[in-house]
Amino acid sequence: MNKTALFVSLIVAVLGGFLLFAYLRRFEFESSGGAPVRVIVAKKQLDPGVVLTEELLATQIVPQAYVESRAVRESEKAKILGLRVSTPVQAQQSLMWTDLAIAADDQRYLSQLVQPGMRAVSVRAQYDDKSFALMRPGDRVDVVATFPQQAGQDQRTSIVLLQNVLVLAVGLDTGAEGAGPRPPGDQRDLLLSVSVNIQEAQLLALAGEKGRLSVALRNPDDVRITDGLVDLMSSTLTDSKARKVVQDLRKTPTGPVKLPSATGAPQ
């Protein structure tokens, strides 16, 4: 009986110690402000108009209880690179979404949104394409070019010309507050201004002369670049094997693609 009582006492003591340890850890966790969150801070003072680059930003770990909902998280860093600061940000101060020109300016010119080394280039939609009206400054898109394989032939080729391109303006809308909704049927929605480097601007100019440009809107959290994409030809539409390969991309969106040729061999 004594051994049984001693064994039970030992179990109770161990269980009590474990519960005390768990309580102390929880108390420490709550008193410290909760789980750590990685937020973006300024390495040095940022004045209004400064373009955000990797060199100007750092990451700081802050307890969740002390993180404002407006703070830019480390996971969102790729979405703010290239944007301008609209309000002064002190060194080591957390960067807020309201500090960015994309959210705060009440009047902005397109030239003010172009970061150094980049260019604003306009992509015009076809008159029957209404998708541009659904886009907003700050969105990111992929640019697709479609053009004839040879003059006078019906066969066409479609290529992914550029990926993850920042939209600076839609028509005359640069994202300024108070701009209000655009009137229905406003033809200015047919013009999309995007941020590219000078050689990408050359590609867009050549593709615009050769054929038709279209854009595919991306999820704002998706900034991946897909490697290994191949050009698609009109024959892909009637080739069931090639269509299946394209459809399989939905399962593995980041992998390379090999389309079967007309003879069944991979291209």
Image (tube, grey):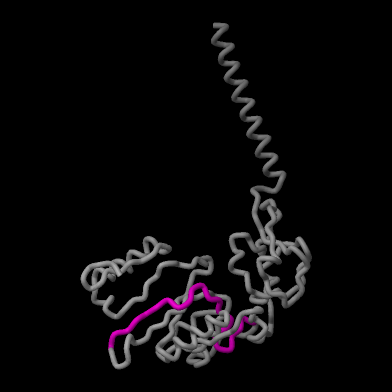
Residue located 65% across and 35% down the image: 23
Report the side of 32 relative to 197 (left or right).
right
Quadrant of the snapshot with the C terminus: bottom left
Give the x, y percent position of residue 73: 63, 60
Instruction: Tell me: residue 258, above or below residue 13.
Output: below
Instruction: Please name whichever residue, 128 or 1, is drawn nearer the observer in this view of the structure.
Output: 128
State whether the magenta stretch is mostly helix, strand or loop. strand
* Res. 51 image quadrant: bottom right
Residue toward you, 80 or 233: 233
Q: Position of residue 259 (x, y in %)?
A: 30, 69
Q: Pinpoint residue 58: horizontal percent, then vertical percent.
A: 69, 60
**Where does the magenta region start and end?**
154-176
Residue at x 31%, y 79% (from the top left corner): 233
Q: Is residue 24 above or below residue 77?
A: above
* Residue at 69% across, 51% down: 63
The residue furthest top is 1
Pick the residue in front: 190 or 255: 255
Looking at the image, the residue that sits furthest to the left is 263
Q: Which residue is rendered at x = 66% and y = 66% of the image? A: 54
**Occupied quadrant, residue 121:** bottom right
Q: Quadrant of residue 166?
A: bottom right
Q: The N terminus appears in which quarter of the rendering?
A: top right
144 with respect to 247 (left or right): right
Q: Is residue 146 magenta?
A: no
Residue 120, horizontal then vertical, whole percent: 58, 84
